[in-house]
Amino acid sequence: MEKFDSNQMDAALDKLLKHATDPAIPEGAEARLMAAIRGMEQQPNVVKFQPRPKFHRWAVGIPLAASLALGIYLGSKDTFDAYFPDSIIGGTTADLSDSAPSTGLDDAESYAEGDLT
Amino acid sequence: MLLASARRDAAAFAELVSRYYKPVYRMVWRMMNGNAETEDVAQEAFVKLWQNPAQIREAKALKGWLMRVASNLAIDRLRSAPHTDINAIEEVADPNQRTDADLDVRAATGRIDHAIARLPERQKLALTLVYFEGMSNISAASVMEISVDAIESLLTRGRRTLRESLAEDWRGLLDELSSKVG
C-alpha cells in the first residue's frame, strides 16, 4: 500500500469528506412542519392567576385573646391549682410549706458519726 | 422575525423554518445515519421553538439553539432505539437512471458515509457542525456547550478515526471519485 505523509492524508481526507452524501430534504417536509405547527392548539403560555382565599388576620387573635383572658381569670381565683394534677401542685406546695427546709446538715452529722442509714 | 414568532405569528415562523430547516435536517440526518426518523426529529426541534420561543433571547443565537436541541433529540432517539443502519442511506432515492460510473461514485460515497456513521456521536456531531455545516469552532463549541479546545480535540480525534477507518481503501476511493466526478 502506498504510504502517505500526514499532510497528504489530511488533504485526502478533506477531499473525501467533500464527497460525503449531501442529504436531500424530503419533498414537502417544511410544509408538513408548518401544518403541524398550525394544527397545534394554541395554548396560552400564561397561567391564570388564582386569588388566594380571603384571610382575616385579626381572626388569629381571637383564640389568643380568649386564652389570655382565661389565664388571667383562673390566675385571679384560688382554684387555679385544682386544674393541675397533684403530682405537680402537691409536691411543690409541700416543699414550699415545709417549715424546716432540708439543708443537708443533719445528714452530714449522721455521716460523720458513721450512721449511714 | 423571532419576535413575531414569539407572538405566534405563523407566517413569521414559516420564514424561520425556510431559513433554518435545511441545516437542522442535514445535521439530524448525519447524526441519525440517514434514518427515516430524521424528519420527525427535525420537526420536533422546531415544535419546541414554537412552543417556547422565550428560550431564545437573541436572534443570532437561534441557529445554535436549534442545532443544539435537534442534536440532543437525535442522540436521545438513537439511544432509546439504536438503529445505526447506515444502509438506510440507500433509501435516499435517486430517481434518475444511473450509469456504472454513477454507481461507482455512489459506492465510494457510501463508504465515506459509513465511516462517518461509525464515529462516536460527539466526534460525529463536531465534524458535522464544522465540516458539513460550515460552522466556526466557536459556534460549534457553543452548540455542544463545550470549550473551543474540547471541540478541537473532538475534531482531531474524529479525523484520526476516519483516517484509520478509511486507511485501507482511501487511495482507491480518491481515484474513483476524482476520475468519475472529475
Image (cartoon, helix red, strand yellow):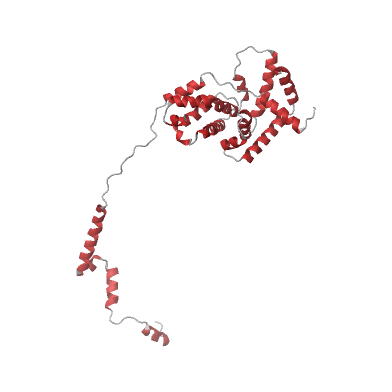
Q: Nearer the viewer, residue B88 or B123?
A: B123
The correct choice, above or below, for B110 with respect to B160 in the image is above
Q: Is residue B171 visible?
A: yes
User: Residue farthest to the right?
Assistant: A2
* Residue A95 or residue A38, whichever sits in front: A38
Specify the quadrant that holds the C terminus of chain B.
top right
When asked about the image quadrant of residue B71, the answer is top right
Q: Could you say which quadrant of the image residue B101 lies in?
A: top right
Residue occupying the far bottom of the picture? A113
Q: For the image shown, how many numbered marks are present on the structure?
A: 0
Q: Is residue B37 in view?
A: no
Image coordinates of residue B110 in percent, x first then y, are 66, 22
Is B108 displayed left or right of B85 in the figure? right
Please tell me whether residue B87 is drawn above or below residue A64 in the rendered image: above
| Residue B172 occupies quadrant | top right
Compared to residue B88, the image places residue B75 above or below, namely below
In the image, A97: left or right of A47?
left
Residue A68 appears at what percent x and percent y?
24, 62
For image coordinates 24% across by 60% down, the residue present is: A67
Q: Position of residue B68 (x, y in %)?
A: 54, 34
Residue B106 position within the rendered picture, expressed as x and y whole percent measured from the top left = 67, 19
